[in-house]
Image: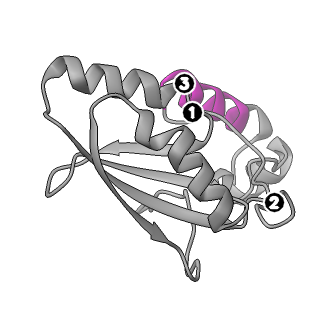
Amino acid sequence: MLLQQDGRMTNLKLAEAVHLSPTATLERVRRLTAEGYVLGYRAVLNPQKLGAGLLVFVEVLLDRTTPGILDDFRRAVGDRQEVMECHLVAGGFDYLLKLRAADMADYREVAGRVLWKLPGVRETRTYAVMEEVKNSAAIHLDI
């Protein structure tokens, strides 16, 4: 939990917080990383300062959902840096995408250049975020 809040926390500070020796703490963090519990560390950037203030979610409905089409779509989305997240979902559409753009005009350009040209796309629905109420990548741990 502490590393989710501050991935740059020193091993000494973490050891003090969890009441273990620095050596034992370092070994636990290494083991958690080796076993795939800790996937990595990254900086969280300010989208406003970087000209990406508009957050949008896009529902994507494909023409059909055959394994070949799903693979083609997945591969194409994986190559597009404009798409921050892509999730295959159950329900009334096939994929939910998360993107950022400078503004609505910039998003419209990205939609025409990228989204509507992805393989198998029949229809999209865009939801522009008016207010980001909560944004967290932390996983709740009941420990």
Q: Residue at x 20, y 53 (%)?
A: 93
Q: Is mark 1 on a helix, strand or loop?
A: loop
The quarter of the rendered structure image containing the C terminus is bottom left
Do tag 3 and tag 1 residues touch (Cβ < 8 Å)? no
Upstream in sequence: badge 1 or badge 2: 1
Q: Which residue is drawn at 78% across and 47% down?
A: 43
Q: What colouring method underlies this structural image? A: one colour
Q: Which residues fall within the magenta stretch?
A: 24-36
In this rendering, would 27 be left or right of 92? right
Does residue 7 show up?
yes
Give the alpha-carbon distance from disc 2 to disc 3, as whole Å. 22 Å
Give the alpha-carbon distance from disc 3 to disc 1, as whole Å. 21 Å
In this rendering, would 23 be left or right of 123? right
Q: Mark 3 points at which residue?
A: 79
The label on residue 51 is: 2
Upstream in sequence: badge 3 or badge 1: 1
Indicate the amino acid at tag 2.
Gly
Quarter-of-image position of residue 33 = top right
